[in-house]
Image (cartoon, helix red, strand yellow):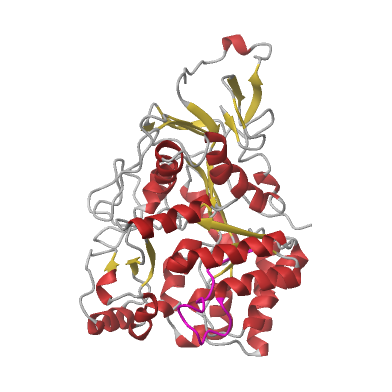
Amino acid sequence: MADPRSGTERVVDVVVDGGKVVAVGSLPPGAESAEVLDVSGLVVGPGFVDLHSHVHSIAGQRLQALDGVTATLDLEAGLMPVEQAYARAAADGRLLHYGVSASWGDARATAHLGVTPGADLHASLAMLGDPDWQRTSTPAERAVWLRLLESELEAGALGIGVLMGYAPRSDPSEFLEVARLAASTGTATFTHVREIVEADPTTPIDGSLEITRAAAETGAAMHHCHVNSTSRRHVDRVLDLLDTARANGSRVTVEAYPYGAGSTAIGAFFLSPERLSAWGLVPSSITMVSTGERIASVSRLAELRATDPGAVCVVAFLDESDPEDAALLQRALAFPDSIVASDAMHVEWPDGSTDSREWPLPPGGQTHPRTAGTFARSLRRMVVETGTWSWAEAFRRCSWLPAQVVAGFAGSAAGKGWLGVGADADLVVIDPSTISDRATYVDPTRPSTGVRHLLVDGTFVVRDGELDTSAYPGRPIRATLR
């Protein structure tokens, strides 16, 4: 077993009773009659906590379960109202634990556009391309969305999700207000940063510098989402900036995923035809998820942005086959305390549906391969192939560190991410000889291999490599403000 909290790897027995780990090492009285699962030669550790998952679906969670994930949290975008988001998940059933942040994007849409959010990620994506949503808020509008965010935190939202990269010309004072709110409530922000200076020298402030300055000025805990996709070939400069900020006492955490392509709404600010060259992109760098169409021209890009701005696309920003680009991805994962997070997206079928209880999944579903393969791909590259991480370190990046990001204001996360007496029985058992991603950009819903067993709240969701399609033990993870 590997316990990332203590940094230890041992050959011992682990005893689970109900939803808790009750013994590690010596067997407690009565354990002789317990069911025994032989995991000789396998690695046992705490299930992975994904801070950045947008799946909100049974289909998506099943793919993530086979990738070793036991908790999926949508913290970068969030949903509003959170009460509706949690109620819908509970009514549908979830095989993994789940949680959402307060959505700055939806709060802004309420104040700017007069919309009433319905805890619907697809609707939220559609409004991101609206120039009236993107602009700087008036003082009255800012007051409205700040009050909304505060009420969402009081309702149990896991911090504040900030899609600043979709409104990159907005006044930086707005972001400071969000940071102050997070600091005053003892929560955190989870930010898709605005453009960095290398991509847009006219940006009001470099996006990564903005998050470090806000953390220093307010004392807030602030999380930098997917540093690889927002920094691209400038990731070394950004990581140095974050390292300096942390050395100076700022509470800045960072995440990365092991892919050279991202996924977003086609109407995003940074995908406008005039912005593509800033990142060395062309229309054919973009592929539509629902149809597999690779965009052939500027005119076609403009048409798609106008007719369906919320449509999900995949954007290639690094060449994974290029050794220098591959090394950039490796350095983002290897950066001290860098957290693995997937930015998983829902699966979409040709008829427009985004969920299914069928297993295996019906053919034709499209998504980004990171939905199915982020964690297995990271383990394959960082533990098995390169030895960059030990198993204990891998679980620290995938389980312990992400759980700690929310544990300070979400008591139900305190037992997650570690393996010892009293820990939650959210466990993954990995075969180190077969752990690997199989999802590709062409076939993105192929489940990972090597996750032999997965327990969520003490219940088998995966056993002997097979999903139990009747298991829905997932529970909500919510904040409790001090």
Quadrant hosting residue 272: bottom left
Q: Is residue 403 visible?
A: yes
* Residue 182 horizontal/vertical position (percent): 70, 66
* Residue 311 horizontal/vertical position (percent): 34, 70
- Looking at the picture, does residue 140 appear above or below residue 400? below
Name the image quarter holding the C terminus: bottom right
**Magenta-drawn segment:** 188-206
* Residue 61 horizontal/vertical position (percent): 43, 47
Task: Name the one closer to the observer, 184 or 477.
Answer: 184
Q: Does 450 sit left or right of 399 as displayed?
A: left
Q: Is residue 344 visible?
A: no
Quadrant hosting residue 24: top right
At horizontal 41% and vertical 78% (from top left) the residue drawn is 270
At horizontal 58% and vertical 87% (from top left) the residue drawn is 136
At horizontal 61% and vertical 37% (from top left) the residue drawn is 4
Q: Let me know if residue 80 is in the magenta part.
A: no
